[in-house]
Image (cartoon, grey):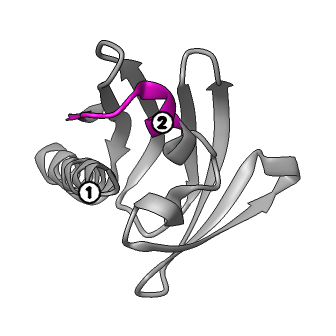
Amino acid sequence: MATASASVRIPVSADKVWELVGGFLSLPDWLPFIAESVSAEGGRVRHLTTKDGEKISERLQSFDNQARTYSYSITEGPFPATGYLATLQVIADGDSAAVVKWSGVFTPNGISEAEAEALFQGVYDGGLEALKGNF
């Protein structure tokens, strides 16, 4: 199984960061390459459309508002991986800062483990930098 993980420190409260990223449908609010997020199955599934028209479907696996974390799996998408499970978490770093962690595990499909890890590492790094730019 391959893995990727990224984190970023943001100089605002964890609650404020969670307000932006904590909604399962909120990706278009902070992740530039996601143009649309449509809810299905009572909010347990999100159908995403990227800026270049790719379709991705993700299922919410766990959600803990108090701990400011959720996990999701990819059920359909253009990625060369199977068994994808990712977690997004916002952790307080004092009263006026937060650390956001985004990590995933997956099985490469048709590419090497290193290539798959680099692909998702790029998504996580770029996504968290974009998130930080919102503050």
As drawn, the label of residue 2 is none
Residue located farthest toward the front when viewing the structure as drawn: 96
Q: Is residue 32 above or below residue 76?
A: below
Residue under the point 43% across and 70% down: 78
Residue under the point 18% across and 44% down: 113
- Locate residue 26, reporting x and y percent: 58, 55
- SS of the residue under disc 2: helix
Which quadrant of the rendered structure holds the N terminus?
top left
Viewer-proximal residue, 135 or 55? Answer: 135
- Locate residue 29, reporting x and y percent: 50, 63
Q: Could you tell me if the residues under marks 1 and 2 are in contact, i.e. CB atoms within 8 Å?
A: no
Per the image, the residue denoted by label 1 is 133
Between the residue at mark 1 and the residue at mark 2, the CA separation in whole angstroms equals: 14 Å
Q: Is residue 47 left or right of residue 22?
A: right
Category of crowding for the residue at label 1, using alpha-carbon neighbours closer than 10 angstroms: few (below 14), some (14–19), many (at least 20) = few
Per the image, the residue denoted by label 2 is 16
Mark closer to the chain start, 1 or 2: 2
Say what amino acid the circle numbered 1 marks.
Answer: Gly
**Per the image, is 8 magenta?**
yes
Residue under the point 56% across and 30% down: 70
Boundaries of the magenta span: 7-18
Q: Is residue 43 left or right of residue 82?
A: right
